[in-house]
Image (spheres, grey):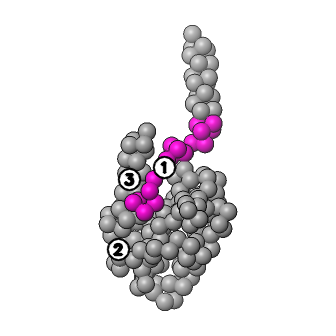
Amino acid sequence: MKKLNRILAIILVLAALTAVCACGGDKYAKLSVDVNGIGRNMLNIARFEFKPEVMDDPAFAAEQLKLATADLNMIDGKPEIFYAVSAASPEAVFVIGARDAAAAKSISNGPIKNWIADYREGYSSYGPEQVPKLDSCVNMTAGRYVFVIVSNDNAAAKKSLTDLLDTALKING
């Protein structure tokens, strides 16, 4: 009987792993959000020393972040991007709609990591007290979206973002 229980347990674990691998393990795989809505919510929820200002030119945002157009979801010929930055600090909120989940991961691991590294280098001498914000910033993907938040409390911002995404997932089913 113990041998049968062990075999059944192994089968159940393998089935669970297969299910996770089949769906990519991303509970947000089918998530659909309004990048501007999520971005504006995060501006109001997260704590900032110098609140970022929204830049309403997604093409400019894509250029500033050095994003490849081929990786982006385009709406009416414009990249799906929410972009808010502070002129006085590295604080920022970006929500980027990518073509698909693979493109989102590529953006997060490429241009966004480069942006963070560049800002970290610049602030190391210009404003070293700002560097911890960059070291702990949110750089996260969920489905085909990339979320970047640089704030005074990045852990709280990440929790708030996750709560918003979980709510959107429940609403959109």
* Type of the residue with mark 1: Ser
Which residue occupies 42% across, 42% down?
A: 172
Q: Earlier in the sequence, mark 3 or mark 1?
A: 1
- Amino acid beneath label 3: Leu
Spatial distance from mark 1 to mark 2, Cα to Cα?
Answer: 27 Å
Q: Quick one: 53 or 77, which is closer to the camera?
A: 77
Residue ID at (56%, 66%) = 78
Image quadrant in which the N terminus is located: top right
35 magenta-colored: yes
| Mark drawn on residue 164 | 3
Q: How many marks?
A: 3
Please report contact status of discs 3 and 1: CB closer than 8 Å, yes or no: no
Q: Give the CA separation, mark 3 to mark 2.
A: 18 Å
Between circles 1 and 2, the one closer to the viewer is 1
The residue indicated by pointer 2 is 48
Q: Which mark is residue 32?
A: 1
Front residue (pair 171, 56): 56
Q: Residue at x 37, y 51 (%)?
A: 163
Q: Residues within 10 Å of mark 1 (few under 14, many from 20)?
A: some
Earlier sequence position, callout 1 versus callout 2? 1
Image quadrant in which you'd find residue 156:
bottom left
Amino acid type of the residue tagged 2 in the rendering = Phe
Which region is colored magenta? 20-38
Name above or below for residue 3 compared with residue 152. Answer: above
Per the image, label 3 sits on a secondary structure element best described as helix
